[in-house]
Image (cartoon, helix red, strand yellow):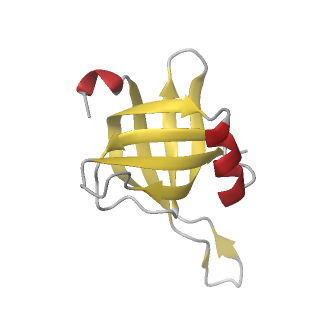
Amino acid sequence: MRAGMLRDRVTVQTLTPEVKDTHGGFTDGAVSIIVARVAASVAPLAGRELERAVQIDPRASHTVTLRFRPDITVRQQVIFHDPDRGDRTFEVAQVINPNSDRRELQLLCKEAL
């Protein structure tokens, strides 16, 4: 993977689930940052890629490509630091290691509301 392809910046986060508090209610889960402001490529899906992605998750809309990291899993979210539109949050639907060579990851993502 050439470094020039990774022109965007993303932050990968893990959300812990809601936890019961002592009063019988729930408190929001904490956010832990896995990777902060790492180089990536964020691209919307189109054509055949979109058709294949919709079969995995009907709301899939973007693919995020970044260097391989073993700590990135499906239960995480990616914050895309878009200079034009501001920060955008994506939920990771699938993690793909394209050539099984541990060099890059492709994250199939859906935009969080």
Question: Residue 68: where, in percent of width, then height?
Answer: 28, 50
Question: Residue 51: where, in percent of width, then height?
Answer: 70, 45
Question: Residue 85: where, in percent of width, then height?
Answer: 61, 20
Question: Residue 70: where, in percent of width, then height?
Answer: 29, 61
- Residue sitting at 58 percent across and 71 percent down? 17
Q: Quadrant of residue 96?
A: bottom left
Report the quarter where the C terminus lies: top right
Q: Is residue 73 above or below residue 47?
A: below
- Residue sitting at 56 percent across and 14 percent down? 84
For the residue pair 51 and 63, the one nearer the viewer reads as 51
For the residue pair 74 and 28, the one nearer the viewer reads as 74
Q: Quadrant of residue 65?
A: top left
For the residue pair 67 and 15, the one nearer the viewer reads as 67
Q: How many marks?
A: 0
Report the quarter where the N terminus lies: top left
Q: Is residue 100 above or below residue 83?
A: below
In this view, the residue farthest toward the front is: 48
Left or right, 98 with reference to 44:
left
Residue 112 visible here = no
Q: Is residue 103 above or below residue 38?
A: below
Residue 2 visible here = yes
- Residue sitting at 38 percent across and 58 percent down? 72
